[in-house]
Every structure is written in C-alpha cells, then in structure tokens.
Image (cartoon, rainbow, N blue to C red):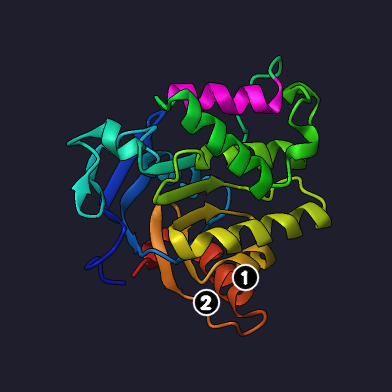
Amino acid sequence: MAGEGALLQLDRISRRLGGRQVLREVSFALRRGEVLGLLGVNGAGKSTTLAIVAGVLAPDAGAVRIDGCDVADDARAWRSRIGWVPESVPLWPELSVSEALDATGRLRGMGRSARRATIERELARFDLGGVATRLCGLLSLGQRRRVGLAQALLHEPDLLVLDEPGNGLDPLQAMQLREAIASLSPERGIVLSSHDLAEVEAMCNRVVVLHEGSVRHDARLDGEPGRLDAQFRAIARSPASAAA
C-alpha cells in the first residue's frame, strides 16, 4: 500500500545481526484503525522488524517514520507514541500487578494522579482487578500477557506493537486477546507477529509476509477461508530469488 497518510511507514529497512542479513529493504505502511499481521517462518525477520518499529533496534539502512517523523530525529518522542509488548513480557516478579503498572507509569514520567487514573482504567480494560494485588511472578501466562498490554497502553500510544501475543494461550485466553485487540484497533494502529494463521485471520485486516528477510506479500485479508494458508505455504516453500 502507499505510504501517503500512513501512521507508520517502513522505507527500505535493512539490518544485519550476528553476521547474517536478517532484513533486506523491508517496506510497508500502516494506517490508524488497521491491525496488520506480520507472518513468516522462524528466522524470516519478524521479531527484528518489530524491534526496529518499537525503537529497540536501529536499522542499518532505511527509515522508519510515524506520522512522517523519522525515529532517528527524536527517539524519545517516538517511543512516547508506541506501546511495545515483546514475546516474553518483561514484568517484575516481586511486584504486584498494581505496583508493576505504577512503576511503568513512573518510568513514563507520569504524575501520581495520572498514574492512579490510568492504572484503574487498564485494570478494568483487561479485567485485572481480581489480581491487582497478586505478585507478577505468580501470574498465569494469560494474565502476564494482559498485564503486558496494560503496561503498553498506560500512556495511550498511537501505535501498538505485539510480538507473538497469542503464543501459549489457551482457547479462552486467545478469545479474550482477540476481543481486547478488536476494542483497541479503532483508535490506533496495531502491528503484530504470529505463527498462527487462524489467529491472524481472526484479528487482522491486513497481512505482510516476510520470507528470508524480504516482503513477499502485502495485502488486505479478503475473508476467504483457507486462502491465507495457501498463500503463506506457497511463499514459505519458494526460494528467496522468487521475491517480486
């Protein structure tokens, strides 16, 4: 899709890690209200792409922009507009859920009254009131994911970046995750990676497929059952030289 009017724009991003070319001139864009699923086999470059979008890694070449502003120009302002939930949610095991959210708010520079209001909002949004005083180290995987989302949304970011958000969740937890993402998407842009094609079809309205570090497919989901599976299998089995 064209980048004009996009919330997020990746322009020919490349990155090497551990002596290997992980990303090769990756370009795609995302508008507000879109939920973009980033697909690819292991090693395709999904997590590296998301880490670059989140400002955790810098690209070796290319540009990343939010509303036309380059991350390289003001990384702090960039991060203030992004909520980032990595695959392994970083929580303080010795803190309660409320304490962890309060600590996150402090790191974001939020005042006491703002922290109190936003913590109450996120506890309600993700149905975490019943575990607010529980230590993070004692939470289930699904609860940890919801706390991670609450942390990422404390400052009401424009862009939410999720790395394998449904990994390891049971069917009920996965359904709750889909409902949460659906409720969030009208207000912001969301980009997520997943190995689960059914999960992507349920949550996303666009999909980008990476193969050997390059974009091989970028299109809206048409809702036809099984079509994404066929497209993904064809790309995953093809050589990198077949990239368009």
Three-letter amino acid code of the residue under disc 2: Leu
Foreground pick, 209 / 162 = 162
| Residue 155 percent coordinates (x, y) | 44, 39
- Residue 198 position within the rendered picture, expressed as x and y whole percent measured from the top left: 68, 67
Query: In the drawing, does residue 96 fall left or right of residue 115?
Result: right
Which residues lie in the magenta part?
Answer: 96-107
Q: Position of residue 89 (x, y in %)?
A: 62, 33
160 on left or right of 32: right
Residue indicated by mark 1: 201
Three-letter code, disc 1: Glu
Q: Residue at x 61, y 85 (%)?
A: 224
Which quarter of the figure has residue 117? Answer: top right
- Dominant secondary-structure state across the stretch colored magenta: helix
Inter-mark Cα distance, 2 to 1: 7 Å
Comes first in the chain, label 2 or label 1: 1
* Residue at image mark 2: 221
Give the SS element for disc 2.
Answer: loop
- Let me know if residue 209 is in the magenta part: no
